[in-house]
Image (tube, rainbow, N blue to C red):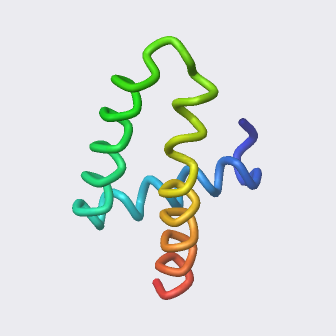
């Protein structure tokens, strides 16, 4: 992933947001743990089941990042 690429920036913004918002990081972690149990052999279903929260977190993270 090239430095400064949109994907790299997304990764860093999300990482920083989750580091400073442990309650949101915990919610994401809990959902991932639940989904891995529900879909142990179905990665597309696992990804789909966490997409809603992940999209929410991304919006929150970019809003938080702009306010910094």
The location of residue 62, given as percent across then percent down, is: 57, 73
Q: Is residue 48 left or right of residue 61?
A: right
Residue 47 sits above or below residue 39 on the image: below
Where residue 42 sits, quadrant-wise, is top right
Residue 68 sits above or below residue 4 on the image: below
Where residue 35 sits, quadrant-wise, is top left
Q: Residue at x 29, y 66 (%)?
A: 21
Q: Residue at x 27, y 43 (%)?
A: 30
The location of residue 44, given as percent across then percent down, is: 63, 27
**Residue closer to the observer: 55 or 63:** 55
The location of residue 64, given as percent across then percent down, is: 47, 79
The N terminus appears in which quarter of the rendering? top right
The location of residue 23, given as percent across then percent down, is: 23, 63
Q: Residue at x 58, y 30 (%)?
A: 45
Name of the residue lying farthest toward the top: 41
**Residue closer to the observer: 61 or 68:** 61
Q: Is residue 8 left or right of residue 6?
A: left
Q: Is residue 64 left or right of residue 27?
A: right
Q: Residue at x 32, y 35 (%)?
A: 34
Residue 65 sits above or below residue 58 on the image: below
Name of the residue lying farthest toward the front: 38
Residue 40 sits above or below residue 68 on the image: above
Name of the residue lying farthest toward the bottom: 67
């Amino acid at each position: 992933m090239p430095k400064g690429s949109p994907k790299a920036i997304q990764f860093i913004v999300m990482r920083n947001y989750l580091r400073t918002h442990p309650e949101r990081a915990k919610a994401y972690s809990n959902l991932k743990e639940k989904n891995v149990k529900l879909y142990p052999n179905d990665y597309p279903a696992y990804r789909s089941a966490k997409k809603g929260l992940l999209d929410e977190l991304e919006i929150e993270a970019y809003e938080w990042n702009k306010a910094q």
